[in-house]
Image (cartoon, rainbow, N blue to C red):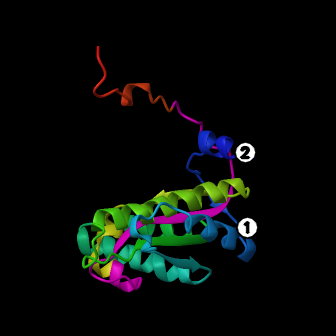
């Protein structure tokens, strides 16, 4: 598969199942992340792997978060939050270990981790897997960040769900870009 094909056809998966990336594929996925743009060469990205029984613990954390921020949720709604952690064989929590004391702005450190996450998704597709990138309130919650080992100045940029896509793929929607581009400073 050519790189341009991956870039032009990538879309989030609807459903993911086993097999997930093995250690060899994960090595390539993380090597791809390590080549993300990174002002100052800080390498701020951090990855937390959640697989196997750890997904159940993560699901409990998801449900606890939902209960804390929306105490009115029904038992069924809390269960839906819990099982989100089971929708792929592997979840990679992508974080940015941000250092506000360096000259590189924190936003650029966070963006570098986001670029690493995108590289991981593209690598997964190139290797025959697929992914979903999720955030939501979980990614910005201090208790969730702490439970996953991130510090107060760190950011979770996403929960990457990785596995083999099952069922029909989501249609590739139009990604028109022309209305998002304009020239600046040209005579006209």
Q: Is residue 56 visible?
A: yes
Residue at 47% x, 59% y: name it: 115
Report the residue marked by disc 1. Answer: 19
Q: Are marks 2 and 1 in contact (CB under 8 Å)?
A: no
Could you say which disc has been placed on residue 138 in the image?
A: none
* For residue 27, side relative to residue 152 (left or right): right
Report the residue marked by disc 2. Answer: 2
Q: Nearer the viewer, residue 138 or 83?
A: 138
Element carrying mark 1:
loop
Q: Position of residue 135 (x, y in %)?
A: 39, 61
Q: How would you rate the neighbour count of disc 1 (Cα within 10 Å): few for under 14, some for 14-19, many for 20 or more?
A: some
Residue range highlighted in magenta: 145-174
Q: Is residue 75 visible?
A: no
- Rendered view: 160 above or below 101: above
Q: Residue furthest top?
A: 188
Q: Quadrant of residue 138?
A: bottom left
* For residue 147, side relative to residue 20 (left or right): left
Q: Nearer the viewer, residue 137 or 47?
A: 47
Q: Position of residue 118 (x, y in %)?
A: 52, 57
Residue at 75% x, 47% y: name it: 1
Q: Quadrant of residue 27?
A: bottom right
Element carrying mark 2:
loop
Residue 175: say if magenta.
no
């Amino acid at each position: 598969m050519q790189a341009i094909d991956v870039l032009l056809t990538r879309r989030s998966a609807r459903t993911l199942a086993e097999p997930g990336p093995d250690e060899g594929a994960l090595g390539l996925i993380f090597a791809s992340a390590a080549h993300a743009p990174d002002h100052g060469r800080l390498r701020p990205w951090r990855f937390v792997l959640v697989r196997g029984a750890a997904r159940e613990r993560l699901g409990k954390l998801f449900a606890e978060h939902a209960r804390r921020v929306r105490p009115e949720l029904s038992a069924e709604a809390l269960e839906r939050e819990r099982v989100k952690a089971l929708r792929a064989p592997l979840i990679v929590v992508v974080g940015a270990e941000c250092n506000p004391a360096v000259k590189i702005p924190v936003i650029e450190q966070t963006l570098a981790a986001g670029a690493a996450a995108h590289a991981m998704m593209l690598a997964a597709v190139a290797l025959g897997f697929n992914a979903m990138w999720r955030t939501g309130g979980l990614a910005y919650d201090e208790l969730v960040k702490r439970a996953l080992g991130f510090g107060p100045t760190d950011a979770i940029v996403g929960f990457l769900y990785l596995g083999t896509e099952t069922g029909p793929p989501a249609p590739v929607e139009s990604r028109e870009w022309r209305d998002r581009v304009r020239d600046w400073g040209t005579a006209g």
